Image: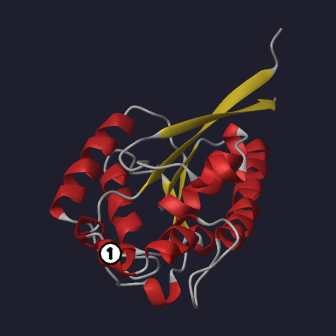
Amino acid sequence: MNNKKTLTIYVLTHCESCYNRRGIFTGRVDSKLSPEGHKHAERLAKDLARKQIDLAFTSPLTRTRETLKHIKKYHPRMQVVVDDRLIERDYGTLSRKSKQKYKREHPDLYLIYHRSYNIAPPGGESMRQVEKRVLSFIKDVVNMMRRSYLNVLIVAHGNSIRPIRKFFEHLTNEQMMKLENMRHIIFRYQIKIKK
């Protein structure tokens, strides 16, 4: 007799924000969803409508909460927890700057600050720092799922999802930093637990 139960974590980034649309380093700047972002959020919500989701975690930023609001329409009894550990990477002095303009003016620094694991933008946060707080979060969530037998949804940001994917997909730092185009995709991870 199989005495194992499988639970699911659904993971997705917020949909397109107004700053995303304009190609701005957003980080912790609180940008709302664009009209296109709302359309994509509704599509994702419909994709998840028939899934059993007991609990959702999101960051405190508006774009994640607006994405989650679309999903919650189909899951009215789903509990929602805002966890600061999921907040987007702090881009420091790059926040609110055009990515394309910065790339043209500082091509050598752009790749370092944008995709380095160890080096933080001035006044900002390195991916190593992001990973530390996100791993603490994901380990807590997995332990809670095993104790409480819950399926979980996480709505976060591109940089806070990178360490989650690294954790479940057993990626290297280099592989994690090469992850791109994660928006509007639902990642699913199975957690096997003993009953």
Q: State the image coordinates of residue 112 (x, y, percent, origin top left).
A: 57, 71
Image quarter hosting the N terminus: top right
Q: State the image coordinates of residue 12 (x, y, percent, origin top left).
A: 46, 49
Q: Residues within 10 Å of mark 1 (few under 14, many from 20)?
A: some
State whether residue 160 is above or below residue 4: below
The image quarter in which residue 118 lies: bottom right
The image quarter in which residue 126 lies: bottom right
Residue type marked 1: Ile
Taking the spot 26% from the left edge, 42% from the top edge, the residue there is 43
As rendered, which of 103 and 79 lies closer to the eye?
103
Question: In the current view of this chain or complex, which residue is farthest to the left?
Answer: 35
Q: State the image coordinates of residue 154 (x, y, percent, origin top left).
A: 53, 53
Taking the spot 46% from the left edge, 50% from the top edge, the residue there is 180
Q: State the image coordinates of residue 24 (x, y, percent, origin top left).
A: 32, 75
Q: Which residue is mark 1?
A: 24
As rendered, which of 109 and 37 lies closer to the eye?
109
Asked whether the viewer can see residue 88, the reply is: no
Question: Would residue 75 appear left or right of 36 to someone viewing this image?
Answer: right
Taking the spot 79% from the left edge, 32% from the top edge, the residue there is 193
